[in-house]
Image (cartoon, helix red, strand yellow):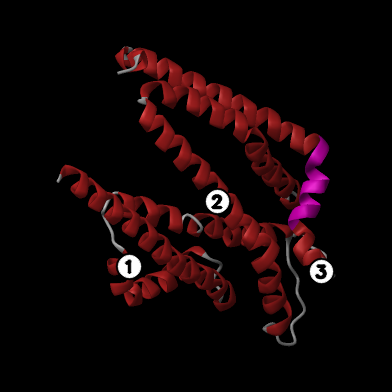
Amino acid sequence: MSEEKKLPLSEHFLALRRVFLISLIAVFAASILCYGFLREPIMSLVTGPIAQYGIQLKFTNVAEAFMAYMKISILAGVILASPIVLWQVLKFVLPGLYQNERRVFLTLLFWMVLLFVLGVCFGYFVVLKVALKALLFNFSGEFDPFITVANYLSFVWKFLLPFGVVFEIPLLVFFLTKLELVTPMTLVKYRRYVIVVIVIIAGVFSPPDVVSQALLALPMYVLYEASILLSKRVYRAKQRKAQQTDDEER
C-alpha cells in the first residue's frame, strides 16, 4: 500500500482543495485569454457550419452577443486548461493507487478522452452540417430563418455533447465484458430492447426535432453493433485464457 493512503483525512481534503483552486485559476486565466485574443476565431469556428449557408446570426437583446462570446470563451478556456486540470487530478489520484490500478486508470482515462473527442469531432464535421441543411432548407417550407446567436449556440451544444457521450459505448461494453457482467450473447439477445432505449435517449438528449434525433440514434446503433463485435473478441480471448489455465493446471 502506498504512503498516500496512510495520510490523514485532513491532508486529503487539503490536497483536494489545492487541486480545485489550481484548476479553477487555470480555467479562469485561460478563459480570459480566449476572450481577449481568440474570441473571434473561436466564434468563427463554431458558427462556420451555418455561415456556409449564408445565414447571418442575429441577437435580440442588448447582452445576448456579449454573453455568447463569454460562453464560448469559458468553454474554450476549459478545453485550453484541461491539461493542467487533468494533471492536477492525476497528481491527486495516482499516489493512492497500486501499480496495476494506475495502469488500468490511465488506460481508461486515455480512451475516455479520445472517444469523447472523436465523438464531438464526428458530430461537428460530419453530422452537424447535414442536420443544419435538412432543418434550414429541406424541412423549413416557405419560412425564412431568423436565428439568434444564443439559439444557435444552444442548439450546437445540445447537438454535439451527446455524440461525445455515446462514443463511450464501446469502452463501456469492453470493461463490462472484461468484468464478466455482460456477454456478447446477452447484447445480441436484448438488441431489440436496446434499439428502443436508443430512440428514447436520442429523443431526450438531442435537440427537439426528428432530424437531430435520427442523426444521433443512427450512430448510437452502429456503435452498439460495433460493441457487440468488440465484446465477442474480448469474450473469446477470456475463454482461451481460461482454457490455457485449465490445461496448465492439469
Mark 3: amino acid:
Ile
Residue located beneath label 3 in the image: 55
CA distance for labels 1 and 2: 22 Å
Q: How many residues crowd around disc 3 within 10 Å: few (fewer than 14), some, or many (20 or more)?
A: some
Tell me the quarter of the picture where residue 234 sits: bottom left
Number of the label disc, if any, that sits on residue 187: 1
Mark 1: amino acid:
Leu
Mark 3 residue element: loop
Residue 142 versus residue 32 in the image, above or below:
below
Q: Is residue 103 left or right of residue 129?
A: left
Q: How many residues crowd around disc 1 within 10 Å: few (fewer than 14), some, or many (20 or more)?
A: many
Measuring from the top left, give residue 125's x and y in whole percent.
70, 62
The residue sitting at 71% across, 41% down in the picture is 73
**The furthest residue to the right:** 54
Q: Earlier in the sequence, mark 1 or mark 3?
A: 3
Q: CB under 8 Å between callouts 1 and 2?
A: no
Q: Is residue 231 left or right of residue 221?
A: left
The residue sitting at 57% across, 59% down in the picture is 158
Mark 2: amino acid:
Phe
Q: Earlier in the sequence, mark 1 or mark 2?
A: 2
